[in-house]
Image (cartoon, rainbow, N blue to C red):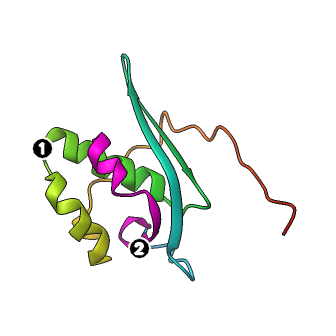
Amino acid sequence: MREGAKLFIGKKDFIAFQNNKHPASTTVREIEKISIEKDDLFHFTLIGNSFLYKMVRNIVGTLVYIGQGKLQLSELESIIASGQRKNAGICAPAHGLTLKRVFYDFTK
C-alpha cells in the first residue's frame, strides 16, 4: 500500500477517483503526501491542494485493495491514466474518516 501511495503523489488528473454523481469542472489536483501508519488500525493521511468529492475515500479503498491483493500495484498507473472510476478500488466507508485541518492561503 505504501508503494502504491507514492504513485498518487504530484499533480495529476484524478478523474478516476471522483464520485461520478458529482463531477467537478476540473479534476486535476496535487497530492503532496500520503502516509500510512498501522497500529490496531490503519491510519491514512493525505495532504493536497484540494480534493474531489469522495476522492480520499476512493484512493484509500484502492490502496486497501492493493494491500489485499485484489488489485496489483502494477495496475495502479494505468488505473490513474484510464480516467475510469470503475477501474479503481471501492469507496472506503465514511466511518472513521476525520478531517483534521484545512489550510487557506490568504495571500492570493
Camera-side residue: 63 or 106? 106
Q: Amino acid at mark 1?
A: Gly
At x 27% / y 45%, what residue is drawn?
3
**The N terminus, quarter of image:** top left
Residue on which the image places disc 2: 15
Q: Is residue 59 left or right of residue 75?
A: right
At x 12% / y 44%, what residue is drawn?
69
Q: Is residue 4 within the magenta segment?
A: yes
The quarter of the picture where residue 101 lies is top right
Q: Amino acid at mark 2?
A: Ile
| Residue 103 placement (x, y as % from top left) | 74, 50
Residue 84 visible from this viewpoint: no
Tell which circle, 1 or 2, labels the residue nearer the N-terminal end.
2
Residue neighbourhood size for the residue with mark 2, other residues' Cα within 10 Å, grouped as few (<14), some (14–19), many (≥20):
many
Residue on which the image places disc 1: 69
Q: From this view, report whether residue 76 is shown above or below residue 108.
A: above
Magenta span: 1-18
At x 31% / y 68%, what residue is drawn?
80
| Residue 21 placement (x, y as % from top left) | 46, 73
Q: Kindly state the secondary structure of the residue where label 2 is placed.
A: helix
Q: Is residue 81 left or right of residue 96?
A: left
Q: Is residue 90 within the magenta segment?
A: no
